[in-house]
Image (tube, rainbow, N blue to C red):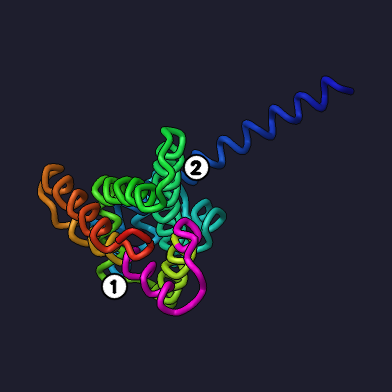
Amino acid sequence: MPRKVAHQSGNNAWQWSRTAETRRVMLQAAREVFTERGFSESSIADVVQRANSSVGSIYHHFGGKTELFLALWEDHQNSYEEHATAAVAQARANGEEDPLELFIAGARAFCQDAWERRDLQRLFLEGDAPPGFHVMRRARARGWVRQNAVLFGAGTDPPERLQVSVMTAIIGEAAREITACEDESEVAAITDSVATMLRRLDPFNEDA
C-alpha cells in the first residue's frame, strides 16, 4: 500500500509539472501574439498556432481570449512583485533597515523588470484591452500603495496615504519611460534618477 501512495504522489507531481509547462508555453505564445498585434487584432487561433496547441487546450486552461490576456497580465504583475520583494529581502539580509532604502531597492528591481518585460509593459499601457481591465489595474495599483505604506509604517490619514501614493507613482512613471529606452544605459540613468528623487522627497524622514 505505501508503494502505491508513493506512485500516486509521483504521478501527481508529474501531472502538475506538465500542466505548469503547458500554461507557460501558452502564456509565452499569448505574449508574442498580443505584443505583436494587440488584444483586439489577436485571436485564440493565433495563439493556438503559435503555441502549437489546440483550441480546446486553451479554453481548458484559461477560458478564452480575455481570460488569457488577464492571466498574462497577472503573470506580469506577479513578476514585478516577486522581483521587488526579493530585492527588499536581500537588502534586509545585507543589514539595511532604513525603509526608504528598502523601498529604493525594490524600485530598482521594478525598473529592471520593466526593461526586461518592456514588450508587455507597452501592451498593458496602450489601452487596447478587454472590458474591465482598467478597473482591475487600478485596484492592483491601490494594493501596491497599501503594501508600500506598510513598509514605511505610514498611517491611514489622507496626507500620509498621499505621500506613499506619490512615491509609488514615481516608480510607475519610471517604468513608462523605460519602455521607450534604447539600451540599458538609459534604463540605469532613469533608475538612478528615481533613487535620487525618492531620497529628496522622503516625507517619513524625521531628520529632514
Name the foreground residue: 162 vs 76. 162
Q: Amino acid at mark 1?
A: Gly
Rendered location of residue 40, percent (x, y): 31, 70
State left or right for residue 110 relative to residue 193.
Answer: right
Name the foreground residue: 111 vs 118. 111
The residue under the point 12% across, 48% down is 186
> Does the magenta stretch mainly form a helix, a strand or a loop?
helix
Q: Is residue 172 above or below residue 156?
A: above
Q: Amino acid at mark 2?
A: Thr
Please say whether residue 154 is one of the residues in the magenta stretch. yes
Question: How many numbered discs, if any?
Answer: 2
Quadrant of the rendered structure where residue 145 is? bottom left
The residue under the point 56% across, 55% down is 60
User: Crowdedness of circle 2 by 10 Å Cα count: few (<14), some, many (20+)?
Assistant: some
Secondary structure category for the residue under label 2: helix
Quarter of the image with the N terminus in it: top right
Which disc is residue 22 wearing? 2
Q: Is residue 37 visible?
A: no
Quadrant of the rendered structure where residue 37 is? bottom left
The Cα–Cα distance between marks 2 and 1, rounded to whole angstroms, is 28 Å
Secondary structure category for the residue under label 1: loop
Return the residue at label 1: 127
State left or right for residue 16 relative to residue 171.
Answer: right
Part of the protein shown in magenta: 149-168
Q: Is residue 14 visible?
A: yes
Please say whether residue 164 is one of the residues in the magenta stretch. yes
The residue under the point 49% across, 38% down is 21
Name the foreground residue: 72 vs 200. 200
Rendered location of residue 141, percent (x, y): 41, 67
Whichever of callouts 2 and 1 sits on the residue coming sooner in the sequence is: 2
Q: Is residue 80 above or below residue 136?
A: above
